[in-house]
Amino acid sequence: MPDRRTEILRAATRLIARRGVRGLRVGELAAEAGVSTSLIYYHFTDRAGILRETLEFIGERADRYTAEPEPGAPADDPCSELAQALLLELQDSAEVRENSTAWGELRASAVFESRLREDLARATHTWVHEIAGLLGRAHPFGTAPAHAASAERLTALLEGLSIRWLSGSLPLDRARSLLDEAIGTEIAGWRA
Amino acid sequence: MPDRRTEILRAATRLIARRGVRGLRVGELAAEAGVSTSLIYYHFTDRAGILRETLEFIGERADRYTAEPEPGAPADDPCSELAQALLLELQDSAEVRENSTAWGELRASAVFESRLREDLARATHTWVHEIAGLLGRAHPFGTAPAHAASAERLTALLEGLSIRWLSGSLPLDRARSLLDEAIGTEIAGWRA
DNA sequence: GTCTATAGGACGATAGAC
DNA sequence: GTCTATCGTCCTATAGAC
């Protein structure tokens, strides 16, 4: 039973994914959330504040579905568990597309708004750390710095492929196979 | 001796790099270019048209400094030539930073504006093709599809690292070393 | 906490002279 | 080709009732 505030943040995420940060209109957000414009300003200081809090919201939501184990798949092998965790973000489902689009928007916005940067860096670090943990379980003999470097490369590659997909420069299945190969290459690198 | 039109495009690139596509105001662009607002509308159809043409401009300019051989360095080895071509885009110089920032902005904008997508896909393809060509010279025995895949991965990784750098989630030297290692890994993959 | 109504300003785009 | 002046709209934010 989410409160109004959370409903507004959810609506903001949907709207940012649909129209972009630049296209987010406070009035439109009110309509999407089914409330009045002034209620938005009751709950948030201003438009920039909405953006900032939406980032946190997206960061938390992204953590949730990355951490969540797949219900249908067994995925006992930590190596394929890693592959799944990353490939999960390159899927043409409404939720993933929405999250990826919104995430990309906020990443791009942070280049120009310093207030967003700190939160974004923290969320990024958390994500990289999670992937590094999976890598550690997939290959326990690698060193922690090597896992960290691989995790940074793989997540940065994923973001790069993701925005190419969303901006129409790369078909989804091509992005998936490129990422899949990169995962293999990173792991193979340790065995050498 | 560039004409007014080109001056406006240059000013647009500067401004997009400074304030983002979202922050580009036609009036501000006029001031930056030292002309009147209405002259902008004489040379371009509307705000979206300015954005589209600025993308082409950036694409051409990026080609130019990627293709250009370094004046000081010998760089006979095609392998280090490749590394240079990619690492050149992760440098804290005004020109690179401006181009990378503007490129990232237009990439992000294309997610929501279909008119931008075609140009962007073409510019991306050209870039990937150039890098694939360098890979072909660095390792003539690899297959063309393998070169293409590596080029796509490396350029996508570069874009991912670049925006993390620009958005304050990754220090520049860290981004450089991560990319450097990835180049080594891609090339090592063929030898195996 | 939530609404209606509106102030106040910024911005894209155009008209028309030179 | 380039300017000055301005229109009309859209949008953020607030005032004030309930």
Image (cartoon, coloured by chain):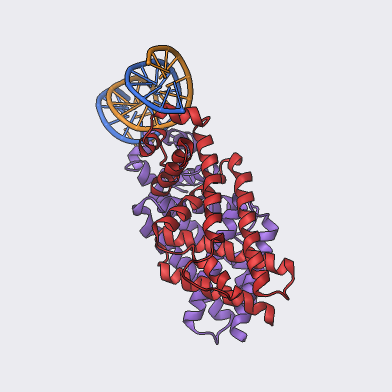
Chain colours: A purple, B red, C orange, D blue
Q: In this view, does B148 lie above or below B58?
A: below
Q: Is residue B41 left or right of residue A165?
A: left
When asked about the image quadrant of residue B95, the answer is bottom left
Which residue appears at 54% of the width and 60% of the height? Answer: B66
Q: Position of residue D17 (x, y in %)?
A: 29, 22
Q: Which of B52 and D12 is in front in this view?
A: B52
B125 sits to left or right of A18: right
| Residue sitting at x 48%, y 66% | B71
Q: In this view, does A71 lie above or below A100?
A: below
Is A164 located above or below residue A85 in the figure?
above
Please tell me which residue lies in front, B97 or A173: B97
**Left or right: A180 in relation to B76:** right
**Residue A10 position in % (x across, y down):** 48, 46
**Image quarter of the C terminus of chain B:** bottom right
Residue B147 in view, yes or no:
yes
Q: Is residue A116 left or right of residue A136?
A: left
**Would residue A24 be visible to someone looking at this image?**
no
Q: Of residues B80 and A147, which is closer to you in this image?
A: B80
Extreme-front residue of the structure: B1
Number of numbered labels in the structure image? 0
> For residue A178, what is the image quadrant?
bottom right
The x and y percentages for residue B185 are 60, 77
Give the x, y percent position of residue B65.
51, 58
